[in-house]
Image: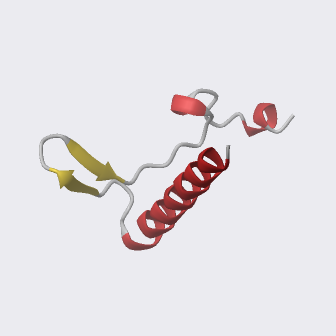
Amino acid sequence: MIRLAIVMGVTLFLDYYTKLIVINKMALGESIPVWPGVFHLTYIQNPGAAFGMLAGKTWFLLQ
């Protein structure tokens, strides 16, 4: 159980830290190849819920 908590904590920290770096160091729409041809880190914004569903419908998401 403790191992799961540690893995979850590290994952959340890395996710948050990566997002901070992207927001502060990349321009919107910029893409950096991490593994060329396979994995690119691209700065986009998602104003909706998962996969862009309900974009612009924050009233629905907050209720």
Q: x, y percentage for residue 23?
A: 47, 65
**Residue drawn at 76 percent across, 34 percent down:** 61
The residue lying toward the viewer, choosing from 14 and 20, is: 14
Task: Identify the residue at image location x=61%, y=55%.
Answer: 9
Q: Residue at x 49, y 49 (%)?
A: 45
Instruction: State whether residue 10 is above or below residue 38.
Output: below
How far across and how far down the image is residue 26, in percent? 36, 67
Which is nearer the eye, 24 or 8?
8
Q: Quadrant of residue 13?
A: bottom right
Q: Position of residue 44 (x, y in %)?
A: 42, 49
Residue with the most extreme bottom position: 24
The residue lying furthest to the right in this view is 63
Quadrant for the N terminus in the image: top right
Q: Toward which corner of the image does residue 22 lie, by quadrant? A: bottom left
Residue 12 place in picture, x, y as percent: 58, 54
Colouring: secondary structure
On screen, 29 above or below 38? below
At horizontal 18% and vertical 40% (from top left) the residue drawn is: 38
Choose top left, top right, bottom left or bottom right for residue 39.
top left
Residue closest to the far left: 37
Q: How many marks?
A: 0
Quarter of the image with the C terminus in it: top right
Residue 40 vs residue 52, the one in the foreground: 40
Seen in the image, is 56 located left or right of residue 36?
right
